[in-house]
Image (tube, grey):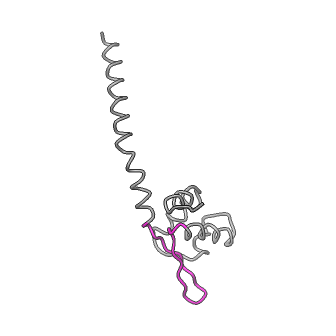
């Protein structure tokens, strides 16, 4: 079964550690050692998370001798945001209906 780009993006974002890594990378490129500092995990564990993010297209890795900085590539997030945004009208309509219902209940209580 072939996994589509959107599925890879959401799978990568499902883990809170990977979301935290992306938040760090939003401030600029960083090496594995820098990214590992806030976490109680090995460099190897951080590298595994980076590989998942890289496979989802959310991170790119450079090479400068032995230094391999990771950089955020937010383009896949645009597709995820667009998919989520498709449901905005649904939620807006649902909240409007709830507001109408609550107004009706309030009016009945006043009478």
**For residue 53, what is the image quadrant?**
bottom right
State the image coordinates of residue 24 (x, y, percent, origin top left): 51, 66
Nearest the viewer among 47 and 56 is 56
Q: Residues in magenta?
A: 56-75
Give the residue displayed 37% in from the left and 40% down from the top.
90
Q: Is residue 50 above or below residue 6?
A: below
**Quadrant of the image occupied by residue 95:** top left
Q: Is residue 32 left or right of residue 86?
A: right
Q: Position of residue 45 (x, y in %)?
A: 67, 68
In-image side of 80 versus 33 (left or right): left
52 on left or right of 98: right
* In front of the other: 65 or 100: 100
Q: Is residue 83 above or below residue 43?
A: above
Q: Residue at x 42, y 67 (%)?
A: 75
The main secondary structure of the magenta stretch is: loop
Magenta highlight on residue 64: yes
| Rendered-image quadrant of the C terminus | top left
């Amino acid at each position: 079964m072939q996994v589509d780009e959107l599925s890879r993006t959401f799978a990568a974002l499902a883990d809170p550690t990977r979301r935290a890594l992306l938040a760090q990378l939003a401030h600029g490129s960083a090496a594995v050692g820098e990214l590992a500092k806030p976490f109680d995990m090995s460099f190897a564990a951080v590298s595994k998370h980076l590989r998942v993010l890289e496979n989802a297209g959310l991170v790119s890795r450079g090479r400068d001798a032995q230094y391999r900085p990771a950089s955020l590539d937010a383009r896949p997030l645009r597709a995820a945001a667009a998919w989520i945004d498709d449901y905005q009208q649904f939620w807006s309509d649902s909240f409007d209906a709830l507001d109408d219902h609550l107004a009706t209940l309030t009016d009945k209580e006043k009478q």
